[in-house]
């Protein structure tokens, strides 16, 4: 079972104050990259794995999806998602994605934003998603990039030479990483890009895109501090399809 | 045009003394991973892009390939390859892979080991390779992993905490990197994994495997120093097919 850190009061309070929680998709710098990979959702059945506050579920509904199933483990997040949702075509459900069951060949599109690095059993989830998609359906997800989940101390360091670097260690040692981000003891699973891709291909998907996200020149102009995001990719975005 | 560093006398002397140059494929720790991705080559037409001393070309011939075309830019390497080759089904040719022309639908398998990070125009090469393959043909290549080509100073550093880390910077800034490896001024092209994968998909390939190479437990037992290779992947190995 995944750690339910979003129901920790300190973590939830901190998370709720992030730009992506306050402004929604427009507060998530990787959203334009994700959006560019989305198919036309009009009339489609969509599942949103780790829906959080429901920003994407509502976006999909506004894009004309016939039905959106938003799934999250956190009761805190689902409560706010339900509170902020008026679209009748959205359903929210609480499930642990490590134990999720989905009906076969039900969905036309599956989406997951920054959720899968919390899960213990990616192989099971990818196979579940694959079975639940109709032929030709797409799957787009983002995770923290393995360069960011690998390090024992994931923070930029300044070397004696003055060079600011991202200190990678343990990249090929997959497994639990515990960090203090918004609250102490946040547990994530570090996986290599190899693992994400192999697990996806092994589940029967075809890879259609892989993007290591960095800010665009325009984003850096708007938020100059983001130029450090070019030193290493913070997000990994993957698109696939069931054939 | 790619830099012809292998015809620099100092570089060539240094390269010729490496285990992979003396022992061939058995001296290359990533060879078992590459070999696991190879199709049955019996009776097949094979092209070896950046064949160097011809170790893989000869391996393919010994595996029953009908014909192997080994291509390299370095006259030094081709001279030694020809000297050590007796198999009549191998042909060596000198070409710059940045300007290579190949006949359409000629080959059943394309291979390239640690060559493409020297090339300026990957998109052109991938399209050329795709056209030259028959439907169903495979393409397997290795490159230095982008984590290794990115840094302005690609060497492990020991932080004040005592932690040994691989200092990543400039990962999302693609382009020329000049290092002093075996000789001063060796020019490589840093590309992200995104670029390798997107260029491959854009050329029409289907991705079938992506491996960030690390030593196996058995390899670490045999060469204990290699445990540091688990801190970051040194090679990226990719397999694809033309459909």
Image (spheres, coloured by chain):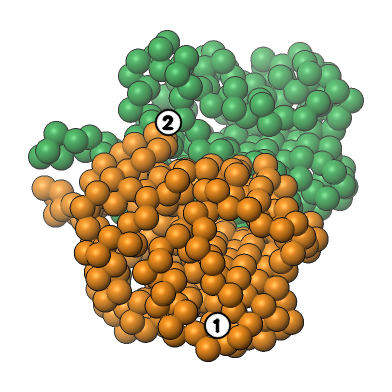
Chain colours: A orange, B green
Q: Is residue B59 above or below residue B177?
A: above
Q: B198 and B63: which one is in front?
A: B198
Distance Cα–Cα, label 2 vs label 1: 56 Å
Q: Is residue A86 above or below residue A49?
A: below
Whole-percent x and y of residue A183? Answer: 22, 58
The residue that appears at 52% across and 48% down in the rendered structure is: A98
Give the mark count. Answer: 2
Q: What is the residue that sits farthest to the top in this orientation?
A: B222
Q: Do the numbered discs 2 and 1 sit on residues whose CB atoms are within 8 Å?
A: no
Residue A81 is labelled as none
Q: Does any portion of residue A219 appear in the rendered image?
A: no
Within the image, what quadrant is residue A223 found in?
Answer: bottom left
Label 1 marks a residue whose chain is A
Residue B11 is labelled as 2
Q: Are marks 2 and 1 on the same chain?
A: no
- The nearer-to-camera label among 2 and 1 is 1
Q: Is residue B11 above or below residue A116?
A: above
Secondary structure under the numbered disc 1 in the rendered image: helix
Q: Which residue is mark 1?
A: A59
Whole-percent x and y of residue A181? Answer: 24, 58
Label 2 marks a residue whose chain is B
The residue that appears at 40% across and 66% down in the rendered structure is: A75
Seen in the image, is B48 located left or right of residue A74?
right
Whole-percent x and y of residue B158? Answer: 18, 36
Seen in the image, is A86 located left or right of residue A19?
right
């Amino acid at each position: 079972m995944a750690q339910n850190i979003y129901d920790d009061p300190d973590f939830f309070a901190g998370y709720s104050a992030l730009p992506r929680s306050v402004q929604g998709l427009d507060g998530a710098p990787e959203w334009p990259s994700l959006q560019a990979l989305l198919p036309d959702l009009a009339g489609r059945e969509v599942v949103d794995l780790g829906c959080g506050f429901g920003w994407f579920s509502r976006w999909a509904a506004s894009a004309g999806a016939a039905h959106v199933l938003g799934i999250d483990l956190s009761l805190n997040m689902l409560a706010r998602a339900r509170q902020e949702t008026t679209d009748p075509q959205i359903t929210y459900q609480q499930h642990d994605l490590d134990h999720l069951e989905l009906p076969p060949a039900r969905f036309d599109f599956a989406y997951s934003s920054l959720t899968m690095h919390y899960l213990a059993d990616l192989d099971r989830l990818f196979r579940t998603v694959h079975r639940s998609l109709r032929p030709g359906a797409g799957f787009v997800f983002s995770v923290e990039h393995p360069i960011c989940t690998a390090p024992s101390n994931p923070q930029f360091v300044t070397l004696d030479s003055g060079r600011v670097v991202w200190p990678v260690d343990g990249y090929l040692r997959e497994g639990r990483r515990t960090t203090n981000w918004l609250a102490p003891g946040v547990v994530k699973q570090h996986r290599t890009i190899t693992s994400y891709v192999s697990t996806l291909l092994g589940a029967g998907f075809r890879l259609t895109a892989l993007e290591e996200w960095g800010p665009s020149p325009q984003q850096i102009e708007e938020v100059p501090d983001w130029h450090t995001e070019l030193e290493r990719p913070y997000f990994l975005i993957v698109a696939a399809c069931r054939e």
